[in-house]
Amino acid sequence: MTTRTITVISAGIGQPSSTRLLADRLAEATTARLTDRGLQVDLEVVELRDHARSLANTLLTGFATGPLGEVVERVGASDGLVAVTPVFSASYSGLFKMFFDVLDPDLLAGTPVLAGATGGTARHSLALEHAVRPLFSYLRSVVVPTAVYAAPEDWAGGGADTALAERIGRAAEELATLVAAREPGSTDRRDGFEQPTPFEDLLFGDQR
Amino acid sequence: MQFGIFSVGDVTPDPTNGTTPTEAERIRAMVRIALKAEEVGLDVFATGEHHNPPFVPSSPTTMLGYVAARTERLILSTATTLITTNDPVKIAEDFAMLQHLADGRVDLMLGRGNTGPVYPWFGQDIRQGIPLAIENYHLLHRLWREDVVDWEGRFRTPLQSFTSTPRPLDGVPPFVWHGSIRSPEIAEQAAYYGDGFFANNIFWPKDHFARLIELYRTRFEHYGHGSADQAIVGLGGQVFLRRNSQDAVREFRPYFDNAPVYGHGPSLEEFTEQTPLTVGSPQEAIDRTLRFREYFGDYQRQLFLVDHAGLPLKTVLEQLDLLGEEVIPVLRREFESLRPAHVPTAPTHESLRAGGSRGGTTSEEGTA
């Protein structure tokens, strides 16, 4: 199997948004590095904005249907995730959090994740470390060491040797390394439907 | 095929006029609804069990005992009896007593309960929900089948030389359904014992339940109780009926929009499309319900939710008239004509006493 599935989650509000811009750069850099390794990439970018109402409904009803349900399914089957949020009030945006709130807590267990964020000032950059990274730690994802934050001034630098471009390259390299090393479609999740726990184990499991 | 209704027992303000029934009014309404269910020819009335406001039915066998005395054919059941926080010894006693008083017209549906504080209020821990359901039911199962039980487990004080009284009527324990909305462990449990499995699919899309039921059916066969299509499946449903579809939608919309469970979320149209909720004419309810069989296979019990979200008693009774006169007779006929001969009907006290661990295969069995 030479194909890897990468899903990009962008929680930008505007259209176009700088969050989407960063998400696209990270996706492009990751794809290039996987291609360099001889792998094909099945890439899809998801704008959470398109699912805003469905997300609110899902929080109330407990089930994701339609296009949002398809996104959830794809995310669960992905070999790697790029997740980018604007920083609102010193943390990830509510829309970003809603998406991860509707996932089964173990859906992303073991999945490599590249986290990115955008904001109106560089002073918010540590939101990636104090808010976004712990979120994925809770979900038992493997977050790459380099998280990428883009402030307004980062979009002004020229060429491929800017600090932002360098960070994007480093983060993409880290994600590509983890994704390439994983068996495609592998997961740390246990599917209770595919592999039900035999009843005797449920009943006497603690006595064996 | 058995048809019935299940009630949550919520006390909810009527959003169209702001009036809220008292607990006394709601309890009397539940009883009236149960009696009406028998009058219009339904087979089953099932009450929920809750231990927090705004719900009234904390003591299901008390209510069902009263209903038993005023009915003749109706099967009295629960949706659900909390197997996690009730003492299984008390469940064994209460339902055996009810069985005697109701001449066997009793079964029950076990569930875990998802209200966090109820667990500590009853001395338990919600994180142990599955192990509690597994162990408590194992004890309940034995208490109804063994005259003298010695027992020791993790969650309850041990028993030495204990006999649960009264013994089940005619030596036949009440049939048990296991209800679950998401746990494969409960489907496995139901399959292991050869008990029924009830998928309360009223809030969730069908794909999820198709998977849960498929697991139950596969494991039912695995444990040697019969073929997968002979497993005993029950389904929830939710209807609001008027002769004219537009009238149903117009009348139900404020109740839907403000319903405690899903109100202020998806639109009525979205929810109708995604879940089994049917708001429309009797014919629409018939068509929709018949389709359940296509997704889930031949099944044995269909329960409808009709009395929640602040609907007035008068409206609920009208719903039951429409169900009883126009929907259920057609469904009964259609389901029966579609059911293969080797697929059993739902077990009843009579069919279990007659010796089958399963229900009989005659068309009249289990129907009123």
Image (cartoon, coloured by chain):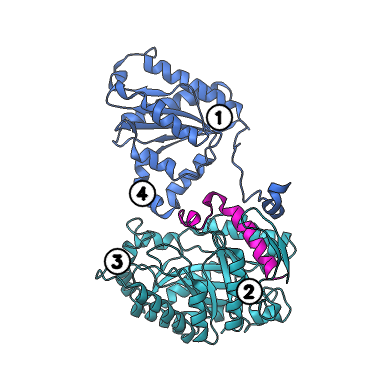
The quadrant holding residue A124 is top left
Q: Which residue is mark 4?
A: A56
Write down the chain letter for disc 3. B
Q: Which residue is mark 1?
A: A40
Of badges 3 and 2, nearer the viewer stands 2
Q: Which chain is cyan?
A: B
Q: Which residue is mark 2?
A: B174
Disc 3 secondary structure class: helix
Dot 2 crowding, Cα within 10 Å, few <14, some 14–19, many 20+: many
Disc 1 marks which amino acid?
Answer: Gln
Q: Which chain is blue?
A: A
Callouts 4 and 2 in the same chain? no
Disc 3 marks which amino acid?
Answer: Pro
Q: Which residue is mark 3?
A: B254
Residue B216 shows in the view: no
Counting from the top left corner in percent of width and height, residue A198 is at 70, 52
> How far separated are the C-alphas under marks 3 and 1?
52 Å
In front here: A18 or A58?
A: A58
